[in-house]
Amino acid sequence: MLLSPDEWQAVRLSLKVAAVATVCALPWALAVAWALARGRFPGKTLLDSLVHLPLVLPPVVVGYLLLLSFGRRGPLGAWLEASFGLVFSFRWTGAALACAVMGFPLMVRAIRLSIESVDPRLERAAATLGATPLKAFLTVTLPLALPGVLAGAVLCFAKALGEFGATITFVSNIPGETQTLPSAIYSATQTPDGDAVALRLTLVCIAVSVAALVVSEWLAHRVRRRVSGIE
């Protein structure tokens, strides 16, 4: 059951990509979830549809659109490389971007439902005491919605950990650079006598996913107890 150096490299890269994707997607997910939960503006239905589009599109299509947009010849990719030196195509940063895009709808949905469960009268009460909308969100809404935020973050992390189609289309399957756990498992299944490698990596995937869910549930339980005033 011991992993080879190449297999450990795929494990470390997967954890790195999933963590970066989750952290980078979280602020945007909070903003979009709040807008969908509390906002009243034209185009809200369109925004909701665009946010959830990666859930219904084939992952290969998402990866191809990312390649067209963020590739070195794409409009956004060329601008980011020229302005900030950021390169996404065929780099681990591109894998993180693809994973963030695929996990974003799950995160937004969980956070939105959590925000909608918070009584708006609490926010209005904070406003009457002089709190700005941002301060009311940070001091009232966000603490009460924190279990949903944690759940959304874990869903995004788990989705990023298992993302395959969009990642391999956008950044290919380069060992040491873009080969995450799913890509390594796929490569192992395509080689003779690779079943043992695929099985080991599959067990690692299962173990990491279960650990993430257990930690998430424990954190959410702790947060709920603090919010309710039970130490």
Image: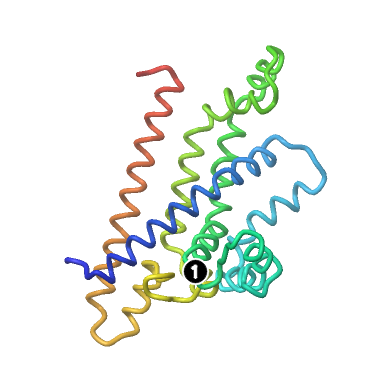
Residue at image point 62% right, 28% down: 137
Q: Which quadrant: the N terminus?
A: bottom left
- In depth, the one of 223 and 69 nearer the eye is 69
* Percent position of residue 179, x then y: 40, 71
In the figure, residue 208 lies in which quadrant? bottom left
Mark 1, residue position: 91
* Percent position of residue 150, x then y: 46, 40
Residue at image point 59% right, 27% down: 138
- Using the image, determine if residue 28 lies above or below residue 147: below
- In depth, the one of 177 and 228 nearer the eye is 177
Which element type, helix, strand or loop, lies under badge 1?
Answer: loop
* Percent position of residue 58, x then y: 58, 70
- Using the image, determine if residue 35 lies above or below residue 69: above
- Horizontal relation, residue 201 to residue 227: left or right: left
* Percent position of residue 227, x then y: 46, 22
Q: Which quadrant: the C terminus?
A: top left
Residue farthest left in this picture: 1
Q: Amino acid at mark 1?
A: Arg
